[in-house]
Amino acid sequence: MDIWSNIGDGFSTALSVTNLSYCLLGVFLGTFFGALPGIGSLAAVTMLLPITYYLEPTTALVMLAGVYYGAEYGGSISSILLNLPGTPSNAVTCLDGYPMTQQGRSGVALFATTIASFWGGTFGIVMLYTLSPMIAQWALAFGPAEYFAIMVFGLVAAATVTQDAPAKGLAMVVVGMSLGTVGADLTTGVARYDFGNFELHDGVSFIALAMGLFGVSEIILSISQKIDKPFIQAVTLRSMIPTRDEVRRSPMPMLRGAGIGAFFGALPGTGPSIATFIGYALEKRLSPHADQFGKGAIEGIMSPESANNAAVQAAFIPTMTLGIPGSATMAVMMGALLIHGIQPGPQLMSENPEIFWGLAASFWIGNVLLLILNIPLIGLWVRLLKVPYGILYPAVICFICIGVYTVRTSAFDVGLVLFFGFAGYVLRLLRFELAPLLIGFILGPMVEANFKRAMLIYRGDFMTLLERPISGSLLTLTGLLLLWSVWVIIRNRRERRQLLVGGADD
Amino acid sequence: MTRHFDPVELLAGLLIVAIGAFFFIGAQDFSMGTVARMGPGYVPRGLGIIGIGLGLVILTGAVRVPGYWPHFSFRALAAILGSIAVFGVLLIQVGLVGATLAASITAMMGNPDAGWRMIAITSVVLALLCWVLFVLLLQLPIPAFWWDL
Amino acid sequence: MNTRLISASVLASGIAALAAGGALAQEFPSEPVTIVVPFSPGGSNDIVARQLGQQLSQMWDQPVVIDNRPGGGATIGSAYLAEQDPDGYTIMIASVTFTMNAAVRDDLPFNPREDFTPIALIGQVPLVVGARPDIPVEDVASFFEYIRGSDALSYGATGMGSIQHFAGELLNQAVGAQVQVVQYPGGGPAMTDVMGGFIEYSIGSMTQMMPQVEAGNIRPIALTSLERSPAAPDIPTLNESGLEGFEVIQWWAILGPDGMPEDVVETLNSSINDVLTTEEFTKFLANDGGTPRPMSPQETADFMAANYDRWAEVAEQANIVAE
């Protein structure tokens, strides 16, 4: 099998007029829906899925994939401008993207996002091209013990994202994990904390949680502070130019982010969220400007955005080569393939090469389109969100409700948005960071399930976890990270007390 | 301004202790199992204890540090949460257009600067927009009006 | 709820029907029919329902809307169906899991045997016992020997009371083995751990297993149906390999709410049976190693009743109970 002829065939498939136009349509619609505050990639793909039923399988997938990464990109627009992440993976972008907007530098933030997304996407696609079969085999070396270790590592890394108050960050992770235990236990079928609601048997709806905690609480805070959005300013090409210092600081985080993203994307079942958190945490450790993180550091955008898009593309590797979707959105995409009678799996590359290579090529073309579409169109997206806040926020509330309702046809989930909106508001008043809660919620159930599986398989021998090379080294690393955090808690507390008590006495 | 404790940290610590206690007490209904065969209560119980512990750590940070009480905005809270509730209830009673209209009006009550004319125009435009976008264009299986229910 | 809503997937057939011009409307159906799928789009129930719905829609010149109402392992969708008018315009696809759920759960918000009208059976698909590629066995007999001989082995299933769990425990009983069940959130993840050699085998659908079998990632041991499958004639059955009468098959049926008029049930049943015998539908099921199984409403009801009894018995013997 000659890879170059495959790539050539792929591009000729992808560049057919039909596929190209649907790719463009998908990318445009995806960016549009993703930029609508409150609608993330899962909701966008779910909403647009029925439209693709009539299309040829390849065309349908090309369009849906365009919607998917378009929405991931669009989500970063509303994250940066409004602090409303459309998807959980965009939550990290808010940490430094929104402060940049508050400083009147949203143009730079959006430009950085576009470049980092493109690089991450391209990196992920190159992996998809060259390493798919190998990665698929390599991912098989990850069993329950290895997944447990990597999830724990991700949790602890995420918890320490909030360096200022590690105890509160850890508390949020624990609350997230506790919420993750809601629902039927896989092994025994026991429904935990469901209070008689069958809607909770599959767990708390992930979108409802994210939208309530981030979207709704942000709106309550904004209108209670009577912010009439003074921050969004016209974004001209000139305003997108980063400072020389920022240019110098960007490439390495972007490269590392892409690597992290491709790694986690390729692991079935992890998805882009964890990659963005770890990318961010890593940059914060490595950066000499650690104090600027959370206040508009360019690395805080470059790394997670690059990681996100690399992961989004790399997530197609387990989906297409193993038939195992890495995330909820991927599961919907795989459903689309199945509806068209195509079974993703090891056979896909040999039996339907035109689909595999055509898709891979169209992914890259889609990323080019994203770049072309967005640098000149940033102004348009911004204008879309420049509607006065007093008019915009009721629309956001309605979009959130509609988006959440559509995913499971469930009014119960709308009620959950209400609950988590309230919870998010209270938590933010009490100066908690919400991002660690989300990552705890995503990873907690996986930690529990994989730990249970490992203990069943190794018959309760905890030492096995430490003896296996991959899980052992990851757990050791996690232990070191935890010790370090404890030290930071003690040090910070001492400093803060001296500072504040001293100040109050003046 | 309080001099001897930080109210935000105090409330934060109490909240985390309460959440930990909620999950810990709730987990008493589920069996623990053994390490080799963990029951459904194993992990929630552990998380509850860790939560209570972390809450206590946060509480210790509140002592002897001055701070302010958080400002709770009832009007904004009631308007936004109310609008979501209105949407959820009306969607399955009168359909998308009515639900959007009512939710938008309720939400805009939270903004003291919004006049009735602005509320009316915004809400009607928004309801029509949602109808066209989600029902007519995207054909989502959401009832638009009560006769579609 | 939205029977009159025309979803995008059926719009085309609706327009086609109009274009065909004034085909005389039968008495039933005179308006769009909704098939509730109590699972998310993309699963086997959803795909079977969509294929059936598309062909019914052509036959009736009426749109057939697929309404996905996932949650609580089919509980939400089933409870929803039980509340609908029994006029035949809202029906649901149910699978073998529906009868298994009834055996293991006592918290269902409906009575599975009383609150529904069995309308028709669609078809059946065998499961395949798929083992890790380097499992040290030669044939089915040595496989039995191997799993009987160790108490450190595990197999994968997709949750308490799932069809894989039932099949696995039945196999344990029949062979006299004590292979430990390990639960996964889906057939895919269970399969990857088999491929990675972390667990010995899992008993999954042919749809999911066969591509991995063909790629050499999974060793097929045996089928769980009574007879071999035309889709994989080389794979023996457990039934022919010493476990006489061993049968665990995935099947799908169409149910309505309780109290449906008999003539509507008959009409639906004969329309569905007409679809089942088309070449298109037979081919569709054969892709997954399945076969259509047309039955009358009464036969469907008896078939389901037999399933309820059987799974209740197995659940009790194997101690498969939600706590």
Image (cartoon, coloured by chain):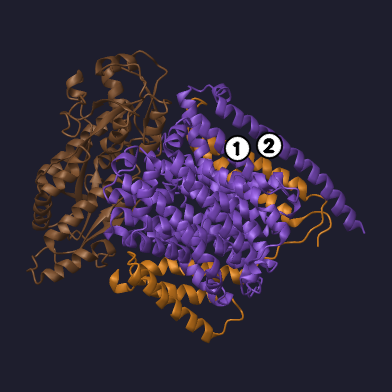
Chain colours: A purple, B orange, C brown
Report if residue B33 is visible in the image.
Answer: no
Instruction: Name the element at disc 2.
Output: helix
Q: Amino acid at mark 1?
A: Phe
Residue A302 image position (x, y, % from top left):
62, 54
Give residue C113's position: percent from left, percent from top: 22, 44
Q: Is residue C301 left or right of residue C217?
A: left
Please say if B102 is above or below B66: below
Q: Chain of mark 1?
A: A
Q: Nearer the viewer, residue C287 or A244?
A: A244
Query: In 3D space, how far apart are the residues under numbered discs 2 and 1 (Cα atoms)?
Result: 9 Å
Parent chain of label 2: A
Amino acid type shown at disc 2: Leu
Residue A174 is situated, as x and y percent measured from the top left of the image, at 60, 43
Question: Which residue appears at 69% of the width and 59% of the height?
Answer: A296
Give the residue displayed 28% in from the left and 59% down from the top: A55
Answer whether labels 2 and 1 touch (C-beta < 8 Å). Answer: yes
The residue at the point 17 percent across, 36 percent down is C306
Q: Nearer the viewer, residue C209 or A442?
A: C209
Residue A410 badge: none
The answer to whether tags 2 and 1 share a subunit is yes
Q: Position of residue A226 (x, y in %)?
A: 65, 74
Q: Which residue is mark 2?
A: A481
Residue position for label 1: A153
